[in-house]
Image (cartoon, grey):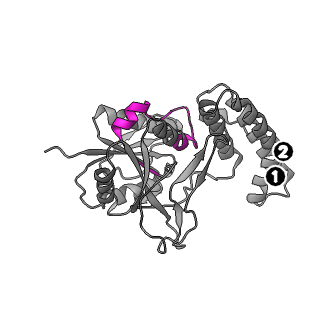
Amino acid sequence: MKLPSVLIIIANYNSSAETDACLSAIRETEDSGFAIRVVVIDNSDAESPYRHHDATVIRPGKNIGLGAAWTRGYLFADSIAADFCLFLNNDAVLDSRFFVEMKAGVEAYGERTALGPRIVRTDDSGTVWSRGGEISVIRASVSHFGGGLDDAALAVEDFETGHLSGCSVFVPMGLLREIGGPDDRYFFHGEEWDLSHRLRQAGARLIIRDSAIVRHGVSRSHERLSPRILYFAYRAKVLFAQKHQSSIWFPIWYGIGLTYAAILAPLKFAFWSREAGSLTAILSLQKALVRAFLDGVGLRKIEETDYRP
């Protein structure tokens, strides 16, 4: 009897140590009754030195971003007739029973359900990083649940959620085909919001499989509050808003957002990055955020070369 198959889709960008640890953990997972295969979409500037661990490696030849990497992986999954996709961050480490718990989740909730794990921090804090969330289409934002809570003190309880973190998303291929797969126009940020929202629009349930554990670190391949990363984050917000807000609300949201990007947001992010006293830092942030709104009009695909310091 043919085992149900899972394709794990991992994007790597100049972070081979994290990718190697991620692949090593996959090899150590317990037998679950799934046939597991891995594809790495390697967006790195040069060939990365990680060990491939029997993974298929696809090298686009440039940094195509996460949304396009997910799409490449999804198309590969379709070509090999995989039954499920697991979109997995390269700085995530699966618990040894991850697939055992996901298999039980599929049996409990059926194949019109996408599953996410409890995600805990890899540091010594013993706290949760993310445990579901809720998307606000009106605000084009996401509220994450569970961040900072004591992992050991939380009861293990599955529940329905409005958002699955892109750190680890387990989706039946049938659902992905129904919605047309991930949207490759997102570069970095937004792809998980869009995927969760479109799955729910298609009538799928999003469930946190609380007994499935993923340990997540902060990738060293980016700085969260840098002008470059904030540019791509706000480009993603504009793209998401244009796609999913009403034609009446989007111009209002856009005007409010552009004003915020020009005045308040640079001060906030400079303060958070401990550079509130640096006019150069504030102006650099302002330029990136305003440019993100101006460049974002028109539902254009977000490219790495769009960012101009």
Marks 2/1: CA–CA distance: 7 Å
Q: Position of residue 172 (x, y in %)?
A: 35, 42
For residue 296, above or below residue 237: above
Amino acid type of the residue that numbered disc 2 sits on in the rendered structure: Ile
Quadrant location of the C terminus? Answer: top right
Give yes or no for contact between labels 2 and 1 (Cβ–Cβ under 8 Å): yes
Magenta range is 168-193
> Disc 2 marks which residue?
263
Tell me the crowding category of disc 2: few under 14, some 14 to 19, or many 20 or more residues within 10 angstroms, Cα based. Answer: some
For residue 204, above or below residue 279: above
Residue lying at 47% horizontally and 40% vertically, measured from the top left: 200
Q: Does the stretch in magenta take in 171?
A: yes
Q: Position of residue 225 (x, y in %)?
A: 69, 52
Q: Does the stretch in magenta take in 225?
A: no
> Disc 1 marks which residue?
267
Amino acid type of the residue that numbered disc 1 sits on in the rendered structure: Leu
Residue 168, visible in the rendered structure: yes
Residue lying at 49% horizontally and 74% vertically, measured from the top left: 153
Left or right, 31 with reference to 267: left
Left or right, 60 with reference to 5: right
Q: Position of residue 36 (x, y in %)?
A: 28, 49
Residue lying at 68% horizontally and 45% vertically, measured from the top left: 230
For residue 271, above or below residue 308: below
Q: Quadrant of residue 93?
A: bottom left
